[in-house]
Image (tube, grey):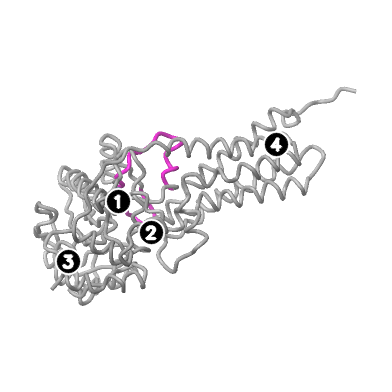
Amino acid sequence: MIEIEFPANNQFVAALIAASLYFLTYVSLVRLLRYWRNWYPPTRSSSLITAGLALATVAFVSFSPHGLSLFALVLAAGFMACLFGIIAAPAIAFLPGAPRPVVEFFAKHGEHAGLWMIPPAILAGYVLPDARLLGMLVTAMAIELAWFLRRKSTERKSYPVDASDLLVLQTQAKGNIESFAKQHSIRELEISPNGGVNWLGCTKNSLPCPLSHYIHRLGLNTPPCCREHIADLRQFVTGCLRDMGAIHWIDGGTLLGAVRENGALLAWEDDIDISVLLDDDTTWETLCDTISQRGSEDGYYVDIFENKTFLTISYDRPQSWPFRWERNRMRGEIRLDLVTYRHATNNGQPVLERQLLKGAMPVMQSGWHGVPKEIILPTSMINFLGSDIPCPNQSEDFLQTLYGDFRTIELTYVDKNAAKTRADIDLEHVN
Ligand SMILES: [Zn+2]
């Protein structure tokens, strides 16, 4: 009798298919993580693709020509669930809200925590030395090792910590900066024997500082390096928009800083908000094409959220495929949100509206959020970070619509206790 050997019966081919399936699932997962980083639930189609690939991987590992192996199923599913939880932790930690100790723990160790799965992988391979399972485990661990090695050597630049940053740091640390840094793994803090404090800041070639953790959880000011990169990013994006002839203006917290802090960033700023008006000359397509192309030329990462009509531009350099989306595993990010507005009418009045809610911007008849056109157009100019930048025509009315009494300091998204601790310093700073 002639036996026909299907490729999947061949041990090597089976291992290779399992490895490929795992790899595809991993790439799909790290791409999905961008939604949490931007505080949005993932789209149904992206979630289904990732879930489908994960199921296909587990099913392929569990089914052999002899049938289903429950043991292999439990091992493969359990291993993937644990590892994917570790991989997703830094992105999930971006979500504001009450602290999540387990997520924060894995987020804190995100550069190497995947390697903690090596002993369970060896154990699983030992108790069930099946080619398919081994193909999956070896691929998973090789990816984790590569992620760790690529992130290990990072170039940093020393910045002196200025008096106001130091005051906030001392207040949050209750006077003991050294033990505070240790407790919260603030690796950037460098304390010299004479008591001088320096910040080993992030660069274009390093991981960004875990900004949202330092600002939202610990109540610290934006680190000096990140402030510098935020200014650089703002310059890059406004340069692109100016060259395109696009009507744009600073929005949200960025406008608030420009108006209330006389052209400075809010001390706890974690991103930049710029808005752009889509019209016959600046379409969604031309905007996306121009920003993407300039981003790849000048070394800025661009992410396009088609269904929400906004883009994010980040300071970190885009990596080549298939490592492009692995950046979503980073704990920090220096980002500019570029939100689009469109012309519309609401109860017969001309308005400018956006899909995404900002502050308390009212809902329009279309279901989007908007303000009367004359509040924004024609745009005016305001000083911001040392140079003039377009702003809404009636900036104060615009801020009033968004935040109500915007002159009152409110540390949005900052942990309540951390905000309370620094309240006195912030009041003093303003008065
Ligand atoms: Zn930094």
- In terms of secondary structure, where does tag 2 sit? helix
Residue 368 at least partly seen: no
> In terms of depth relative to the viewer, which is nearer, 337 or 101?
101
Q: Who comes first in sequence, dot 4 or dot 2?
A: 4
Q: Who comes first in sequence, dot 3 or dot 2?
A: 2
**Mark seen at residue 179:** 2
- In terms of secondary structure, where does tag 3 sit? helix
- In terms of secondary structure, where does tag 4 sit? helix
Total labels drawn: 4
Q: Who comes first in sequence, dot 4 or dot 3?
A: 4
- In terms of secondary structure, where does tag 1 sit? strand
Q: CA distance from mark 4 to mark 3?
A: 61 Å
Q: Amino acid at mark 4?
A: Arg
Q: Amino acid at mark 1?
A: Ile
**Residue placed under numbered mark 1 in the picture:** 191
Dot 1 surroundings within 10 Å: few (below 14), some, or many (20 or more)?
Answer: some
Dot 3 surroundings within 10 Å: few (below 14), some, or many (20 or more)?
Answer: some
Residue 312 part of the magenta segment: yes
**Residue placed under numbered mark 4 in the picture:** 132
Dot 4 surroundings within 10 Å: few (below 14), some, or many (20 or more)?
Answer: many
**Mark seen at residue 373:** 3
Tell me whether circle 3 and circle 1 mark residues in contact (CB < 8 Å): no
Q: What span is in magenta?
A: 304-328
The reply, left or right, for residue 284 in relation to residue 3 is: left
Q: Amino acid at mark 2?
A: Ser
The residue lying at 22 percent from left, 61 percent from top is 267
Residue 323, image x and y in percent? 45, 37
